[in-house]
Amino acid sequence: MSRSAIGAWAQPARTRIPRMRNPMAGRVRVCIAGFYLILSAVVTAQPVRYEPSPVEVVHAMLELAQVTSRDVVYDLGCGDGRIVIAAVVRYGARGVCVDIDPQRIAESRENARRAGVEERIRFMTEDLFTTDLGGASVVTLFLSPEFNDRLRPKLLRELQPGARIVSHYHGMTNWTPHATLHVGERTIFLWKL
């Protein structure tokens, strides 16, 4: 038997075998794709309803974090910017307002302009999970328990030793705070790195 004859029979057959098609298979694939599309939209959307921290809570958060003029305060989910503005006005700190909602960033910027501190604050319309936190010495949060827990690895990875994290109302699972403070019915949590 010649070498070319051996090669010919060793090659896979090029015969096409008809595939059995289930008429529901396409619909199932579309449903699964749709489910994942909706799930990704829900997970990446801004599910935390905006609720401003009361002024007395804002001041208590900044006092608990021992903010000074050397600090850069990041407020993740800044809303109207009141926490960062208070840090700049009361303590001479610099600040960064981060919110995924452009309307909230516009409101923060306008409030900072009215307070005369707009030039000491950076405003970022972006997802807090993609924001670089490397420049923060203090991070403030008023999010949700789920968001706090999802954010924890990022905080631990990106913040420098000595940074402080202050959360209004929500703690973090399996992370004991260094301090807690009660302001009326509200609780404030502090973690130090």
Image (cartoon, rainbow, N blue to C red):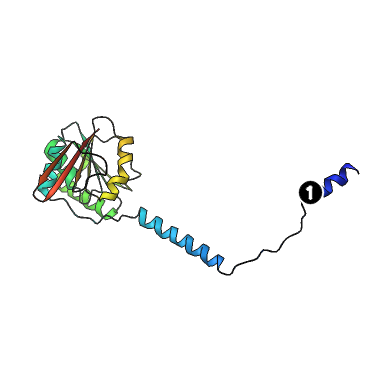
Q: Does 13 appear above or below 29?
A: above
Where does residue 20 sit, x and y in percent of width and height? 65, 65
Where does residue 6 sit, x and y in percent of width and height? 85, 45
Q: Which residue lies most toward the left here?
A: 184
The residue nearer to you, when weighing 45 against 2, is: 2
Where does residue 55 sit, x and y in percent of width and height? 11, 48
Q: Which residue lies most toward the front here?
A: 174
Determine the residue positioned at 29% across, 49% down.
Answer: 147
Secondary structure beneath disc 1? loop
The residue nearer to you, when weighing 111 against 146, is: 146
Q: Which quadrant is home to the C terminus? A: top left
Residue 158 occupies which quadrant of the picture?
A: top left
Q: In the visual, does 157 lie left or right of 177?
A: right
Where does residue 72 sit, x and y in percent of width and height? 22, 36
Badge count: 1
Q: Which residue lies most toward the bottom here?
A: 23
What crowding class fits label 1: few (fewer than 14 Cα within 10 Å), some (14-19), or many (20 or more)?
few
Q: Does 22 appear above or below 139?
A: below
Q: In the visual, does 102 lie left or right of 61?
A: right
Q: In the visual, does 31 lie left or right of 74?
A: right
Q: Which quadrant is home to the N terminus? A: top right
Q: In the visual, does 72 lie left or right of 100?
A: left
- Tell me the residue that label 1 is attached to: 11
